[in-house]
Amino acid sequence: MANCSICNYPYNEGQKLCINCGATIPLDVSVIAKIDILKKMIEKDPLNLNLYLDLGDLYLENNIPLLALENLHKALTIDSNNPEIYLKISKTQQLMDNTSEVINALEKALKIDKSNNEILNELALAYYNQNEWDKAIETCQTYLKHKDDFSISLILARSYREKGLNKDSI
């Protein structure tokens, strides 16, 4: 029996993922080295937002969403008005299939940056996937005020259809 290189949790031979942190087993040595370097840099500069974001991204790229979230939340303690952090949190929550937290993070990001098309796009899709037609419609309409986009128009049309509206009632 060996231990996970990320959280030190024991795992059995042939196991593909750590059941404690979700890391791929075995994790590539170069990834472990990058994680160690970033952790040491954070120890020296604990208020460096970019280090937490880089470490969060590295964890996320290697399918370790819980540790990615931990570092993104630490980044929020440094800068809670950064919509990009909330966007990264939403993408991490999406990988964990936690739609309510995806929406929560995106709504916080949108409060900070009301015209960010990426946030509006992701939020419209999240609302649509949660069958929240009115919110999806409103978000799509806000997006389309800033930019014409086929995928958003499609979400809007499908939301109208799901709500039971046709072209005559819009």
Image (cartoon, grey):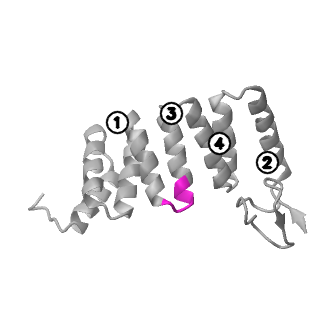
Quick one: quadrant of the N terminus? bottom right
Is 56 on the left or on the right of 29, as rendered? left
Residue at label 4?
A: 71
Q: Quick one: SS at disc 3?
A: loop
Q: Is 104 or 92 nearer to us in this picture?
A: 104
Residue at label 2?
A: 31
Q: Residue at x 80, y 62 (%)?
A: 25
Is 31 on the left or on the right of 46, as rendered? right
Q: CA distance from mark 2 to mark 3?
A: 28 Å
Amino acid found under the numbered disc labelled 4: Asn
Query: Residue 125 magenta-drawn?
Result: no
Residue at label 1?
A: 114
**Marked residue nearer the N-terminal end (2 or 3):** 2
Front tag of 2 and 3: 3
Find residue 63 and report its horizontal and vertical position in percent: 67, 57
Quick one: quadrant of the C terminus? bottom left
Amino acid found under the numbered disc labelled 1: Lys
Magenta extent? 93-98
Front tag of 1 and 3: 3
Task: Name the residue furthest front.
Answer: 77
Is 72 on the left or on the right of 128, as rendered? right
Task: Name the residue furthest left.
Answer: 168
Q: CA distance from mark 1 to mark 3?
A: 16 Å
Q: Residues within 10 Å of mark 1 (few under 14, many from 20)?
A: some
Q: Residues within 10 Å of mark 4 (few under 14, many from 20)?
A: many
